[in-house]
Image (cartoon, rainbow, N blue to C red):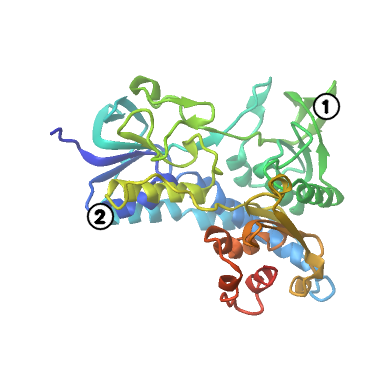
């Protein structure tokens, strides 16, 4: 029997790794992780945690805006203090996660890892071997392939800005574009969003998306549909963006928010025969790649499920259970919610309204303005749409409101476990709360 350095070796150390690697090591397996950057990967260091810290003051100012006259005084956002607070929140996270890993017996290997055969990864000239390898290298920002693309910045750059530019141009209309447009506008920047097509946030219910765009437009954000950006150029102390049919605009800073792409290059996948595409690494229903002992986890996978932190965590824990012998079955994904942290937020889970229109499932619309609980802080912009099957079980939900993320979260058990009317009737929520407001609609 071949002796390896480790039972399981992870390449990359984000949520696709550490949530499962820690309990796997505690189960008695010999585990190591290889990471070339900050321990924790994108989400803790330059993604979710940082973004929500910048968003929280925006949500607070929006609440004050609705309660103006009840809450008195002039409130404004201090960008430099927002960034300082963001940094104070995220700076301790890599060491904290590393401590959890090492405390459970996981070996951390710092460096760039490259597969050299099915059981070996080379790190800085040193070969590390394992019975099983997990590729969890995640995603990175996409960059437009047009002249002057080196003048643009990514989401991490935006969140690290010491001073907010007066004129900010965002290319793209997905999660990052819409969330950062909301934050920058609230903090005082003149924001222009250059959309590739004529829809933003295509994964979300478009009437809700359009309502958010209309609100941002009223607040001063400019949206250009089908912009077809063709070039960026430096113009003295400013920048010029060329788009459309000979159109251009002058700006101070450009955020390229045209998406994220999987980190599949330069890690030896071709050398060992791991199949992948522009969408990520191909896996089967056990998260196994085309090479039997090599698996993948997290956003680097080519999958139908949303590429979000909760998905990566679920996959990481599943692999822990698979490797430790707790299961030998295929991965069974639960209902995975997603949200965009605009203001108001949009959140969803399960069957979409659009799908219900073809399946015949019923859609119940609830207006936020008619909900007494939302009137506490004068919410008027928003609706929820609930999808029920023929047995009147909740199978899908989407909401636009200031509490959309929390409302959808509280409905998850009804969808995941297919609760019927009698079971729903046994759920007693705290009152008053967003949970009680959401559940009373079922």
Residue at the spot 49% in from the left edge and 31% down from the top edge: 280
Density class for disc 1 (Cα within 10 Å; few <14, some 14-19, many ≥20) is some
Quarter of the image with the C terminus is: bottom right
Q: Residue 93 appears at what percent x and percent y?
A: 45, 54
Quarter of the image with the N terminus is: top left
Residue nearest the viewer, comparing 293 with 9: 293
Question: Could you say whether the residue bearing mark 2 is in a helix, strand or loop?
Answer: loop
Query: Which numbered mark, 2 or 1, is in the foreground of this view?
Result: 2
Q: Judge from the rendering whether residue 358 lies leftward or rightward of residue 324; answer left or right.
A: right
Q: Which residue lies furthest to the bottom in this view?
A: 431
Question: In which quarter of the view is residue 111 placed?
Answer: top left
Residue at the spot 84% in from the left edge and 49% down from the top edge: 214
Residue nearest the viewer, comparing 253 with 55: 55
Residue on which the image places disc 2: 27
The answer to whether residue 94 shows anywhere in this view is yes
How many marks overall? 2
Residue at the spot 65% in from the left edge and 60% down from the top edge: 56
Residue on which the image places disc 1: 248
Q: Judge from the rendering whether residue 275 lies leftward or rightward of residue 426; answer left or right.
A: left
Q: Residue 303 appears at what percent x and percent y?
A: 51, 37
What is the C-alpha distance between the residues marked 2 and 1? 59 Å
Q: Residue furthest front?
A: 390
Residue nearest the viewer, comparing 280 with 92: 280
């Amino acid at each position: 029997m071949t002796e390896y350095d480790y039972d399981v070796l992870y390449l990359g150390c984000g949520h696709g790794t550490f949530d499962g690697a820690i309990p796997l090591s505690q189960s008695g397996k010999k585990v190591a992780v290889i990471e070339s950057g900050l321990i924790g990967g994108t989400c803790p260091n330059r993604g979710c945690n940082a973004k929500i810290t910048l968003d929280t003051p925006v949500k607070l100012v929006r609440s004050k805006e609705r309660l103006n006259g009840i809450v008195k005084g002039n409130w404004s956002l201090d960008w430099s203090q927002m960034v300082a607070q963001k940094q104070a929140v995220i700076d301790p996270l890599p060491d904290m996660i590393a401590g959890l890993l090492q405390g459970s017996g996981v070996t951390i290997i710092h460096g760039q890892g490259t597969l050299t055969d099915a059981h070996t990864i080379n790190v800085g000239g040193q070969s590390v071997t394992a019975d099983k390898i997990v590729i969890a290298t995640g995603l990175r920002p996409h960059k437009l392939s047009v002249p002057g693309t080196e003048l643009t910045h990514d989401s991490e750059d935006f969140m690290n800005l010491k001073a907010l530019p007066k004129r900010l141009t965002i290319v793209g209309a997905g999660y990052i574009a819409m969330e950062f447009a909301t934050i920058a506008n609230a903090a005082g920047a003149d924001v222009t969003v250059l959309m590739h097509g004529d829809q933003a946030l295509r994964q979300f219910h478009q009437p809700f998306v359009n309502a958010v765009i209309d609100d941002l437009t009223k607040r001063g954000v400019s949206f250009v549909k089908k912009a077809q950006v063709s070039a960026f150029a430096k113009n003295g102390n400013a920048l010029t963006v060329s788009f459309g049919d000979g159109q251009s605009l002058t700006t101070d800073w450009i955020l390229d928010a045209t998406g994220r792409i999987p980190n599949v290059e330069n890690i030896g996948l071709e050398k060992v025969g791991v199949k992948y595409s522009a969408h990520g690494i191909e896996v089967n229903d056990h998260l196994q790649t085309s090479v039997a002992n090599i698996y993948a986890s997290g956003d680097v996978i080519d999958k139908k499920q949303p590429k979000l932190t909760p998905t990566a965590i679920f996959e990481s824990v599943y692999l822990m259970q698979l490797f430790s012998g707790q299961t030998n079955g295929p991965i069974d994904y639960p209902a995975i919610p997603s949200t965009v942290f605009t203001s108001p937020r949009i959140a969803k889970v399960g069957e979409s309204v659009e799908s219900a229109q073809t399946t015949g499932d019923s859609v119940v619309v609830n207006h936020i303005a008619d909900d007494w609980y939302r009137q506490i802080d004068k919410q008027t912009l928003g609706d929820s749409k609930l999808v029920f099957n023929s047995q009147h079980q909740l199978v899908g939900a989407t909401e636009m409101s200031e509490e959309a993320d929390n409302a959808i979260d509280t409905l998850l058990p009804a969808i995941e476990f297919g609760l019927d009317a009698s079971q729903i009737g046994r759920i007693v929520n705290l009152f008053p709360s967003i949970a009680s407001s959401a559940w009373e609609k079922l």
